[in-house]
């Protein structure tokens, strides 16, 4: 049995590796056709183009993982069925479930590795990809002084600065607002904002507007310390990551901060659950495709490719539909993220149960 397991693993891993390489090549060609004008117009260097595709590759691998897993399953098991190797195994007393066990085990391990890859490799690679893309298009993405800085802090505090000098820890033309629910409770406009020796921000040349008895009162002040502001100088200088550039821990912390500020974090919650559910589609799609391929004695590689593409088209549509339903709060965030896995997982178990063993 060990030899048979190793044989199945070798056949499946080779087919899946070829599927991943083929899909990466297709993604590369399509992206190159779309961006070649941008590379030429902005005189992109060869090193920039190489880094552009190097940092985009992890995202493509995860995005095409379901179809890679399904095509690998279809090609591997269809070939075995066409050469009557599945029939021979059954005649030797080996059930279909036992024959497919190493494939399912490989898919389960690969799903766990895909989650780790999604969490550890894809976010930093996506951040670097966006940086290279902005570099090619001549968009500066610095980690020091910035212009038009808008930051949110705890307890409904918002601060806007027209510019920020990170070396001097000084912001210019600053607007500070504190909200009480949806109502502006306090507004302070200042010429400068400086980081003081006591590690607090101080507005210089400030005008304070506060709401009292239903009317705003204006007060001119030389200095106005913002003691309740929890932002640090690095918060002003740091380039804010997009949710797609965050790992699971960072996105979860971002959601907590968003909720603390009274904002809606539904979309981010759906994306958080997708970070777990999408890598597991590898196992779900293999459970669905294995019984179809193992009982297709007359199917050619072209038929396997057509069936695989059709199933993956429906699967990706279901993933996007669940994501959209979750974003719009028609479904709960976790259900929207797991909808495709649940539907296709149940269908796969039914097909596996009814397969000729």
Image (cartoon, rainbow, N blue to C red):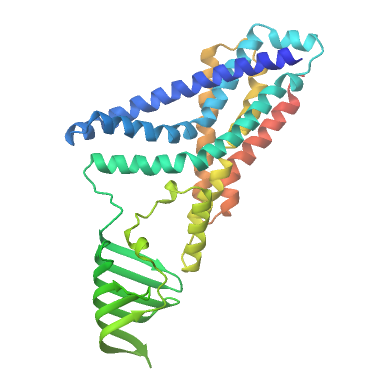
Q: Is residue 124 left or right of residue 190?
A: right
Q: Is residue 144 left or right of residue 333?
A: left
Residue 240 visible here: yes
Q: Position of residue 356 (x, y in %)?
A: 75, 19
Q: Residue furthest top?
A: 83
Q: Which one is nearer the viewer's eye here, 231 or 95?
A: 231
Q: Is residue 327 left or right of residue 90?
A: left
Q: Residue furthest right?
A: 93
In the rendered image, the vertical position of residue 27 relative to residue 218, given as above or below: above
In the rendered image, the vertical position of residue 103 relative to residue 278, given as above or below: above
Q: Is residue 212 left or right of residue 349?
A: left
Residue at point 28% right, 78% down? Answer: 203
Q: Which one is nearer the viewer's eye here, 352 or 163?
A: 163
Q: Which one is nearer the viewer's eye here, 153 or 182?
A: 153
Q: Which one is nearer the viewer's eye here, 132 or 308?
A: 132
Q: Count every numbered label the image shows and give the total.
A: 0
Q: Position of residue 343 (x, y in %)?
A: 63, 39
Residue at point 49% right, 48% down? Answer: 324
Residue 295 visible here: no
Q: Position of residue 112 (x, y in %)?
A: 61, 36
Q: Position of residue 134 (x, y in %)?
A: 27, 43
The quarter of the rendered structure image containing the N terminus is: top right
Residue at point 75% right, 28% down? Answer: 353
Q: Quadrant of residue 214?
A: bottom left
Q: Residue furthest front?
A: 197
Q: Residue furthest bottom?
A: 213
């Amino acid at each position: 049995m060990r030899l048979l397991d190793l044989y199945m693993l070798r056949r499946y891993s080779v087919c899946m590796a070829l599927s991943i390489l083929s899909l990466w090549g297709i993604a590369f060609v399509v992206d190159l056709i779309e961006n070649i004008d941008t590379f030429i117009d902005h005189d992109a260097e060869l090193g920039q183009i190489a880094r552009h595709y190097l940092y985009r590759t992890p995202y493509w691998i995860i995005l095409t993982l379901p179809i890679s897993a399904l095509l690998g399953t279809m090609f591997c098991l269809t070939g075995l069925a066409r050469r009557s190797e599945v029939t021979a195994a059954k005649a030797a007393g080996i059930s279909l479930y036992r024959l497919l066990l190493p494939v399912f085990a490989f898919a389960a391990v690969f799903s766990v590795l895909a989650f780790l890859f999604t969490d550890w490799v894809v976010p930093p690679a996506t951040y670097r990809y966006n940086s290279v893309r902005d570099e090619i298009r001549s968009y500066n993405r610095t980690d020091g002084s910035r212009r038009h800085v808008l930051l949110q802090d705890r307890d409904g505090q918002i601060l806007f600065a027209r510019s920020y000098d990170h070396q001097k820890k000084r912001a210019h033309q600053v607007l500070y607002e504190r909200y009480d629910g949806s109502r502006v409770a306090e507004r302070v406009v200042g010429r400068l904002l400086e980081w003081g020796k006591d590690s607090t921000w101080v507005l210089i040349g400030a005008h304070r507007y506060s709401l009292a008895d239903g009317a705003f009162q204006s007060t001119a002040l030389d200095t106005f310390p913002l003691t309740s502001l929890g932002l640090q100088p690095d918060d002003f200088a740091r380039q804010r990551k997009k949710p797609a550039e965050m790992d699971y821990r960072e996105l979860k912390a971002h959601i907590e901060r968003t909720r603390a500020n009274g904002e809606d974090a539904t979309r981010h919650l759906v994306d958080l659950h997708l970070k777990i559910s999408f890598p597991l589609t590898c196992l779900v799609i293999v459970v669905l495709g294995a019984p179809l391929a193992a009982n297709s004695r007359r199917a050619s590689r072209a038929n396997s490719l057509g069936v695989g593409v059709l199933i993956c088209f429906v699967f990706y549509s279901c993933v996007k539909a669940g994501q959209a339903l979750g974003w719009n709060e028609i479904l709960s965030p976790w259900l929207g993220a797991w909808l495709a896995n649940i539907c296709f997982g149940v269908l796969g178990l039914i097909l596996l149960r009814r397969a000729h063993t």
